Amino acid sequence: MRYSSFLAISALGLISGVSGALAGGYVAPVADPVVAAPVIEAAPASNWAGGYAGGSIGYAFGSDDEIGLDLLEGGALIDRANDLGSVDLKGLNAGLHAGYRWQRGNWVFGPELWVEGGSIDASDRVSVDGVNFDVESSVNYIAGLQFKTGYTVDPQTLVYGTAGVVHGDFDYKLGGSDNSITESYSETGYSLGLGVERKLRDNLSVFAEWQYRNFGKTEVSYDIGDDQTILTRATPEHHNVKVGVNFSF
């Protein structure tokens, strides 16, 4: 009887202890949530590849065409007059152009063909041995083929440089008190430039560009009779700045 009572008390104690443990509860460890780093997607590069055409208006300046005259008789030099002044070509012009571009990542490159004309000219009055001359130089047209290489600084903006070949057609005029003589000539040279272009929409952009054109030196001669010739050297190099629009297709 005593043994049965001991077992009963022991059982009650065990049940009481288990109930107390359950009443206190067991809290499982809580792990901190893993926060994933935000994924930032790079802005897609704008598509500059393909053909385009457009127009521009510009202003030429910065010519340095110094005037010098040689007098030849029978092909031999008999008199020379140097440092007579200069004819500084300048004036408004307009042009058309067309080109094609390829794109590799942010790099954009391709050829461009262009032609310009307008009112680019200059004149000066010089005096040789008491005789006055009016000297005038003018540009009829300039055509060029250049290669453009650029980099997209943002999806809508392209900065670029250019290098190319230019061909120009010019008039050089000597005018005296009685009459004038005009000689036409053409020359090929090179061009270098820098520019920036900005997309307004996928197929329309505007640009601004500076370009230097160098045509070297060209001898221009005038037959004045009596086996005499006046010879001068034209250097119609100049700078040109222009703004324009491109239509992509």
Image (cartoon, grey):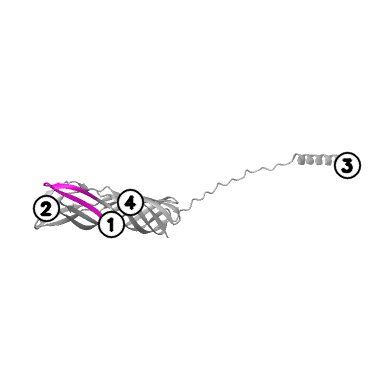
Distance from the alpha carbon under mark 3 to that under mark 1:
127 Å
For mark 4, what is the residue? 58
Q: Amino acid at mark 4?
A: Gly
Label 1: few (<14), some (14–19) or many (≥20) C-alpha neighbours in 10 Å:
some
Residue sitting at 21 percent across and 58 percent down?
Answer: 184
Distance from the alpha carbon under mark 4 to that under mark 3:
118 Å
Of helix, strand and loop, which one carries label 4? strand
Q: Main secondary structure of the magenta part?
A: strand
Label 3: few (<14), some (14–19) or many (≥20) C-alpha neighbours in 10 Å:
few
For mark 2, what is the residue? 71
Distance from the alpha carbon under mark 2 to that under mark 3:
149 Å
For mark 1, what is the residue? 141
For mark 3, what is the residue? 4
Residue numbers of the magenta segment: 122-142
Q: What is the tally of numbered marks visible in this picture?
A: 4
Residue sitting at 21 percent across and 51 percent down?
Answer: 136
Indicate the position of residue 207 as horizontal and vertical percent values.
38, 51
Q: Amino acid at mark 1?
A: Tyr
Indicate the position of residue 219 as horizontal and vertical percent values.
18, 55
Distance from the alpha carbon under mark 1 to that under mark 4:
13 Å
